[in-house]
Image (cartoon, helix red, strand yellow):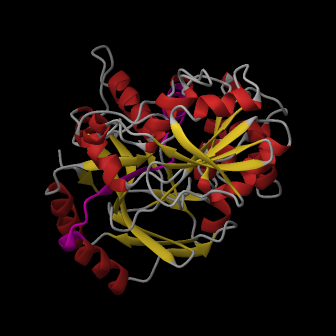
Amino acid sequence: MTLLQPFRAWRPRSGLEEQVAAPPYDVINSQEARAMAQGNPVSFLHVSKAEIDLEPGMNPYDDRVYATARKRFLAMRTEGLLIQDSNPGYYIYRLEMQGREQIGVAGLASVDDYRNERIKKHEFTRPDKENDRTRLADTLDAHTGPVFLTYRHDPTLETAIRHVMESHPPACDFVAEDHVRHTLWVAQDPTVIGHLTNGFDRLPALYIADGHHRAAAAARVCQARRAPHVTPDPHASYDRFLVVAFPDSQVRILDYNRLIRDLNGYSVEAFLEQVKTKFHCTKATLPVRPTQTHEFGMYLKNQWYYLEAMLKPDQEHNPVARLDVTLLQDNLLDPILGIVDPRKDTRIDFVGGIRGLEELMRRVDSGEMAVAFSMFPTSLSELMAVADSGQVMPPKSTWFEPKLRDGLILQAW
């Protein structure tokens, strides 16, 4: 199989893209989704967060949620709100945010390439979220939100992508409520398809930037449908999954900050003394946004502190050990605050940098949290180094902006 393949996407009917397309399922909670979809019956949140159409407080993993999602998804197709393209193609997807643009290619990636590490991972998944995305894809017979991939910049691919943008009018172009502009071009010319397919196939690897749970879910759905007792559908595409691949030269990673509910039994003074055994710690007069690696901000009891890690020499040669998220986890969160497994511990929460340092201060000042840590963003080169080494990062190491919309490009089988 080729690394990337064109397909016949399901897309919102022309003119409905802005109303249908929705934020990814995992960046808003049920309450936020309910408010966002209010008065908009065509929002894709009625599929991706189907609990909003059931009674408040509904467990999002309840069987009725998946059944409701399938009913709404089929209705959107039957009613002509979603229409499948007649011919296979690639989809050029441009996002513009705060004067920056990133341009990717949407297509189908191979589950086998994901399994054999040609599509590389950099983090573990959470079982509850992986189970949820598996059930949704299996129930819908579709992948409705793309996996965000990146690759090392390739001039030949850039030329082919720019040719599509310059020679075709966009299929849709709108600015979402978060001020991100989304523009889509459809590339169905066989010559262009060939250039893009061959260009991606020359790449040594693709890297998952965002969407590990969706990719893992796609592999599980494929495995179940390839089972010996199941008759395979020769026309199905469940052996591939929906992706958008962007060059690393355009991808932006923001900080992914940490909040802890308590000080693990320490007083403020005793906690600070513990911190000083692992970090250079000084008071700051302004909120601390780190400007380089191995720097951290800490907000505690109405006071910001500047922290600088004390590195061991051998850590600089290990792509995971030298990450800031690892340094904080191994030297403070685990040994001092008792956060042994940040994937499962309910005492820790994570806040994407898009929400700003004000969100950290608000939650500590309210008493909800005891201490917050601001991080320097993980770099894309660090991500790729970890993935190339076959290792994984600590959870919540990266926050990518802007986010791809759910419901704008869909794969169904």
Q: Is residue 207 visible?
A: no
Tell me if 296 is positioned left or right of 392 in this view.
right
Q: How many marks?
A: 0
Q: Position of residue 51 (x, y in %)?
A: 73, 35
Tell me if 45 is positioned left or right of 402 in this view.
right
- What residue appears at the point 30 percent right and 74 percent down from the top-left corner? 161
Q: Quadrant of residue 23?
A: bottom right
Hey, which residue is sitting farthest bottom in the picture? 166
Image: 204 above or below 191: above
Hey, which residue is sitting farthest top in the picture? 229
Tell me if 346 is positioned left or right of 400 in this view.
right
Residue extent of the magenta highlight:
129-157
As rendered, which of 97 and 173 lies closer to the eye? 97
As rendered, which of 244 and 354 lies closer to the eye? 354
Image: 56 above or below 293: above
- What residue appears at the point 64 percent right and 67 percent down from the top-left corner? 18
Q: Position of residue 158 (x, y in %)?
A: 26, 73
Q: Position of residue 411 (x, y in %)?
A: 43, 48
- Residue 189 colored magenta? no
Q: Quadrant of residue 286?
A: bottom right
- Residue 143 colored magenta? yes
Q: Is residue 293 visible?
A: yes
Q: Where is the C terminus found, in terms of image quarters?
A: top left
Q: Where is the N terminus found, in terms of image quarters?
A: top left
Q: Position of residue 323 (x, y in %)?
A: 40, 42
Tell me if 196 is positioned left or right of 321 in this view.
left
